[in-house]
Image (cartoon, helix red, strand yellow):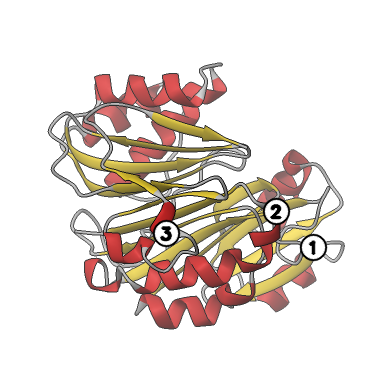
């Protein structure tokens, strides 16, 4: 049992409140995942300034990152160090690999930062400074570990493609088989978490040219198990559930925003929820909203 929350803003005047609203949503699903938590936020000018490449890392103190990459700006958020630099994303990733080979990359792209940690999700949100974050989109997850150890690396979101994130409630039954198949195609993994296999599968399909809807349809065809997924990219926000749809999910939509959560109480903190269209996603139907 894990908790998922996500918020895609359509109304620019709400962007200063993105972190505040996402933190409030996250706080409503703590009981679903008290082990660890993570968020991905899109559009915060401090974490991901416009036009600059961003990489989120685990296992690297801020001082070490600044010493190894003096042209990058380093920001600490609990266990995560976020770096941004006036480079391309590929150039910054190459520089990180060369200077900090022991680091684990948990997110990269432009306009997006990933923050992860272990412990109480409400306390982590405070440590992240989440309430002060601005932007146009955010996803969050509270984890109750079942498939792998409680570590920052095992926390969600899994971000393994440019500005792409996946959060997951459930379990994939055939993840070991698909991991082997992806490794045979040159895909590398950072953990034994089954959710990372889903994220790598989606990223691999997107890299091959599929759009997000197609990538998630292919995932439904290939993966066995029980799952609710929320997937975000640089311009999209998508939800899909397995064929049985036993893992909870609700979507709320207004002209100002689209939100998804594992429980209604996480949606009830949003402005205008009384006028929202609220529905439960149908099994194996892919829902995509674009910026």
Residue carrying label 2: 12
Spot occupied by residue 207 in the image (x, y as percentages of width and height): 56, 23
Q: Total of numbered circles in the picture?
A: 3
Image marks 1 and 2: residues in contact by CB distance under 8 Å: no
* Nearest to viewer (mark 2 / mark 3): 3
For label 1, the residue is 69
Q: Is residue 170 visible?
A: yes
The structure residue drawn at horizontal position 80% and vertical position 41%, both measured from the top left corner, is: 88
* Neighbours of disc 1 within 10 Å: few (<14), some (14-19), many (20+): some
The Cα atoms of the two marked residues, 2 and 3, are separated by 17 Å
Q: Secondary structure at mark 2?
A: helix
Q: Secondary structure at mark 1?
A: loop
* Residue 71, x across and y down, in percent: 87, 62
Mark 3 lies on a secondary structure that is helix
C-alpha separation, residue under disc 1 versus residue under disc 2: 34 Å
Give the image quarter of residue 38: bottom left
Residue 158: x percent and y percent? 44, 49
Residue hosting label 3 = 273
Q: Residue at x 61, y 58 (%)?
A: 56
Given this view, does label 1 or label 3 mark the residue nearer the observer? 3
């Amino acid at each position: 049992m894990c908790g998922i929350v996500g918020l895609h803003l359509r109304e620019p005047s709400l962007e200063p409140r993105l972190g505040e609203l996402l933190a409030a949503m996250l706080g409503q699903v703590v009981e679903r995942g008290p082990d660890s938590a993570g968020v991905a936020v899109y559009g915060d000018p401090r974490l991901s300034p416009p036009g600059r490449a961003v990489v989120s890392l685990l296992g690297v103190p801020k001082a070490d990152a600044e010493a190894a990459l003096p042209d990058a700006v380093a920001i600490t958020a609990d266990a995560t160090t976020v770096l941004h630099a006036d480079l391309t994303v590929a150039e910054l990733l190459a520089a990180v690999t060369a200077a900090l080979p022991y680091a684990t990359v948990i997110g990269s792209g432009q306009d997006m930062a990933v923050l992860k940690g272990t412990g109480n999700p409400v306390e982590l949100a405070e440590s992240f400074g989440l309430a002060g974050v601005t932007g146009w989109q955010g996803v969050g997850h509270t984890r109750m570990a079942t498939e792998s150890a409680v570590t920052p690396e095992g926390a969600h979101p899994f971000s393994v493609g440019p500005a792409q994130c996946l959060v997951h409630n459930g379990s994939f039954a055939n993840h070991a088989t698909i991991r082997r198949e992806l490794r045979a195609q040159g895909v590398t993994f950072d953990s034994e978490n089954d959710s990372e296999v889903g994220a790598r599968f989606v990223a691999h399909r997107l890299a091959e040219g599929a759009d997000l809807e197609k990538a998630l349809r292919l995932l439904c065809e290939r993966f066995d198990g029980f799952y609710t997924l929320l997937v975000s990219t640089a311009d999209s926000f998508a939800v899909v559930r397995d064929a049985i749809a036993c893992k909870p999910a609700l979507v709320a939509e207004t002209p100002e925003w689209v939100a998804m959560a594992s429980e209604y109480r996480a949606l009830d903190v949003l402005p205008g929820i009384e006028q929202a269209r609220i529905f439960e996603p149908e099994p194996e139907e892919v829902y995509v909203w674009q910026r």
